[in-house]
Image (cartoon, rainbow, N blue to C red):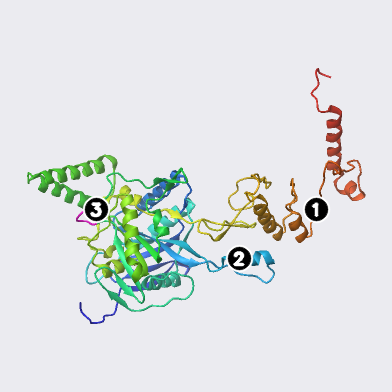
Amino acid sequence: MSARKNTLDGLFSGIEDITDAKGRLVGTVLYNKAGNYSSIFEIENPVQQYCTDADQYYAFMNVLDHILQTLGEGYALQKQDIFCRQKFHHDITPGMEFLTESYFKYYEGRPYTEIRTFIVITQETRKSTFVAYDPKKWAEFNNKVHKVKDILEEKGLKHHLLNRHEIDEYLHRFMAFDFKKGPFGMTNLKCTDDSLKMGDRLIKSFSLVDIDVIDLPTVIHPVQTKPVNGYPVSTDLLSFLSTVPLVDCVVYNQVIQIPAQRRERQRLIGKSKRHASMPDPSNKLAKADIDEVLEVIATEQKTMVWTNFNVLVSCKQKDLTKVTSYLETKLFEVGIAPSKSAYNQLELFTCSFPGNAYCFNKDYDLFLTLQDCALCLFYKERMKHDEVTPLKVYYTDRQGVPVAIDFTGKEGELKLTNNSNFFCLGPSGSGKSFSTNTVVRQLIEQDTDVVMVDTGDSYEGICGYFHGTYISYSKEHPISMNPFKVSDVEYQQNFGEKKNFLKSLIFQIFKGNKAPEKLE
């Protein structure tokens, strides 16, 4: 290997802000060295992990299929899911209650996995020494980007079109392979056949498909079912990417290129004829497979695409063997054998940059398949995060970090009920009082009135802590009241409601607790 040091540069030629006729910013475009231009969206995968609803996976797959149908020939869709290990932090405000402050301090610095998702729309340009500006293709590209934005809005997917500063940070963080919150730095790269060395870390790319020996399941679905605590739960095919051990960052890069369909069909027909001209068992099988694909394309109007799927991981040098073993084992469980000949690690790394979807080599990095099959391998899940609600109650998620939820079910962005009452039932020692004390404390701190009915004395302490009113009773000393006593304020402000209450009370006393035997 040469000891000469080279500069890794020239991957991109620039970033340009796009304005309309009135000078308003409508988007930002990234140009790579080949002249291909791209727009980048940051989105949120709509399927919450362990949601157990298989229909949500198919629904998101249909959204991606709609986007690809909108883009059409000459475009590429690149999707990157970034799994980064972060440390939990919650701001401590001066007026925060002691118990709440202690709660967040307890979880300070606890590691968890954050998922960020980006989709990149790239238009292919004609490969030549010079790239000529084509106003028609440029207008078409901007129109397609706005159509994709409309699709995301229509389907209710959270999205954001990245501006110049955000694209610049995205590219630099990818170069440093550091997506942790806060400042980051870059260092030199040392390239080997099996990984890239960056400081005290190794970056390795795992291609999911070896084009020489394509080892994929015969039938593939966008979702799988696996048992969790004895119950079948629907999960993503690659849901294990969020739990890869001993790594600080994982990037799952998914690329789909839409070629000219007529040209690809003619190429497949020619390939089928060549196999037929050589009477050999393997050629007969190959011809039968090609003919079956051509029949599906003709009868079901399927789209052929060139695809690449690769997983990039960052870890300590001593942990690479364990990480490799984990990924190979998990991929084997879903019927995928990753490539054993991914020796072009630097090329795979640079081609995985956002906007470089057309930089992959067709001879050994891309494989041809149908669009539906390729979309099954797209990652579709997100982690549980804070709900959008003015009334927050914190619980820990499966990763052990606090997340805010709408405990009432009626105050948040997603309305589940119009009644905020709740009932806590469980055997002795199961934690009813502990859980309810925690919920009530958080509700009271947010200026919420709480009325509790309890068969024991579990909440006298929290009632005294917040200077509430605590009323206890027994058979010997029951709670008593005079329903016919009306104060001056009650008479003036709310006598109508009091009168209706008294009428109902008198009628109930008159009726008694037995149904009448005959009509009276």
The residue that mark 3 highlights is: 368
Residue 203 drawn at (x, y percent): 33, 69
The reply to whether residue 352 is in sight is no
- Towards the viewer: 473 or 350: 473
For the residue pair 89 and 371, the one nearer the viewer reads as 89
Neighbours of disc 1 within 10 Å: few (<14), some (14-19), many (20+)? few
Whole-percent x and y of residue 239? 40, 54
Q: Earlier in the sequence, mark 1 or mark 2?
A: 2
Q: Residue at x 86, y 39 (%)?
A: 499
Mark 1 vs mark 2, CA separation in Å:
29 Å
Above-or-below relation of 209 to 234: below
Give me the residue at 27% from left, 50% from top. Answer: 216
Query: Tags 1 and 3 in contact by the CB under 8 Å rule?
Result: no
Q: Is residue 211 magenta?
A: yes
The secondary structure type at the circle numbered 2 is helix
Residue 39 visible from this viewpoint = yes
Q: Quadrant of residue 439?
A: bottom right
Q: Are marks 1 and 2 in contact (CB under 8 Å)?
A: no
Amino acid type at image mark 2: Phe
Q: Is residue 197 left or right of residue 164?
A: left
Front disc: 1 or 3: 1
Residue at screen point 14% across, 46% down: 272
Q: Kindly report the distance in space between the C-alpha atoms of the residues bearing marks 3 and 2.
A: 50 Å
User: In the image, which residues are magenta?
Assistant: 210-214
Q: Looking at the rendering, in which quadrant would you find the C terminus?
A: top right
Quickly name the residue at label 1.
470
Q: How many marks?
A: 3
Using residue 498 as the reference point, say whether residue 37 is left or right of it. left
* Crowd band around label 2 with a 10 angstrom C-alpha radius: few (<14), some (14–19), many (20+): some
The kind of residue tagged 3 is: Leu
Would you say residue 362 sits in the magenta stretch? no
Q: Nearer the viewer, residue 296 or 133?
A: 296
